[in-house]
Image (cartoon, grey):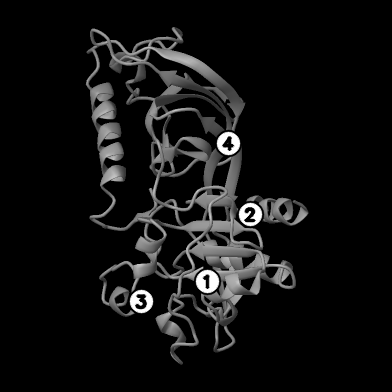
Amino acid sequence: MMTHIPKHSFARRRRALALSVVVLLAACGGSDDGPASVADDSDWSAEAIAPDPDAPVQTSLAVGPLAVGTNRVAFGIVDQAGLLVSGAKVDARFFSLDDQVDGQVTGSLVSEQSLTAVDLPQGYGHEHADGSDHEHSGPATTVYVTNIDFAQPEWWGAELTITIEGEQLDPMRVPFWVEQDTPEPALGELIPASVQLTLNDTDDITLVDSADPPYPDLHDTTVAAALEEGRPLVIAFATPAFCTTRFCGPVVEAIVAPLAERYDDRVKFIVIEPFDLTKAADGDLVPMPVMAEWGLDSEPWVFVTDAEGLVTARFQGITSETEVGAAIDQMLAG
């Protein structure tokens, strides 16, 4: 998934992820006849959710632990070559899973939704400090998202019906745990007044920005100072140089920087590098203290706040300029 940060203080997250692994391993250990039919809505036993190893694609949750309340839920679809699938049509049914009884887990249908494809383009260009053009190329990184309210902490399940090039595949089921709450700032909560490292603390921009070329205007003020100004904020925890997994990508270059130009007179944009860049250059990804202050153990994250610093939208993992832009417009209109 995303670039995960080893922090011993996030025991709740690790417990939830460990439980997910247990369920998924149980699913993989189904009957020798392969996965059972998922035609029975109520059946969420290990056999019913076991993935078919011969299926043309597999799917997984593309965000970290979820919490009670409104969540942006994202799924990744991977083909047999290990590449993320773009251009699919995905419909989802979400189930509240009841307690296991005599080895059987039952589910109650809660919501039916069509997921929206969110593409983070890999093909974009920029100009280096020496004047040379640098074009990034490659397929778009795609996840499929929706917003859903979870009423209580418990096991939930998503049944995805995926259609690729007109062919509808057999439904796939993904169980996941929903916690009462998670450490990062939630919708409606006040963000921490962080005093992170900025260009006011150093003349060496490589200590606060790993982009090439860098974006000095995104590193010129602390969160605490921006809150005192009383402006709406977009705060991104992302690293251009040290994104290492399929669910990060060029968040700063392809999303934050273009939006900062568009909303420059109305919204303050801040990028925070999640890692100590001096150590990262030597291959050691050590989280900056501000990550623990925000309760984050992965990147990228993008938070949108109103002028009071209350979170109006948040995006974990892959998002897009369109998706974040729409959240900014909604915040400004509200």
Name the residue at the bottom extreme: 203
Label 3: how many Cα within 10 Å (few below 14, some 14–19, many 20+): many
Which disc, if any, is residue 324? 2
Measured as percent of width and height from the top left, residue 317 is found at 47, 51
Residue 244 horizontal side relative to residue 205, left or right: left
Q: Give the structural element (helix, strand or loop) at label 3.
A: helix
Label 2: how many Cα within 10 Å (few below 14, some 14–19, many 20+): many
**Is 131 drawn above or below residue 195 in the view shown?**
below
Task: Give the CA distance from mark 1 to mark 4.
Answer: 29 Å
Residue 225 is drawn in which quadrant?
Answer: bottom right
The disc labelled 2 sits on which kind of residue?
Val
Identify the residue at image location x=33%, y=74%: 276
The disc labelled 1 sits on which kind of residue?
Val
Question: Which residue carries the number 4 mark?
Answer: 146
Task: Give the CA distance from mark 2 to mark 1.
Answer: 19 Å
Nearer the viewer's eye, disc 1 or disc 3? Answer: 1
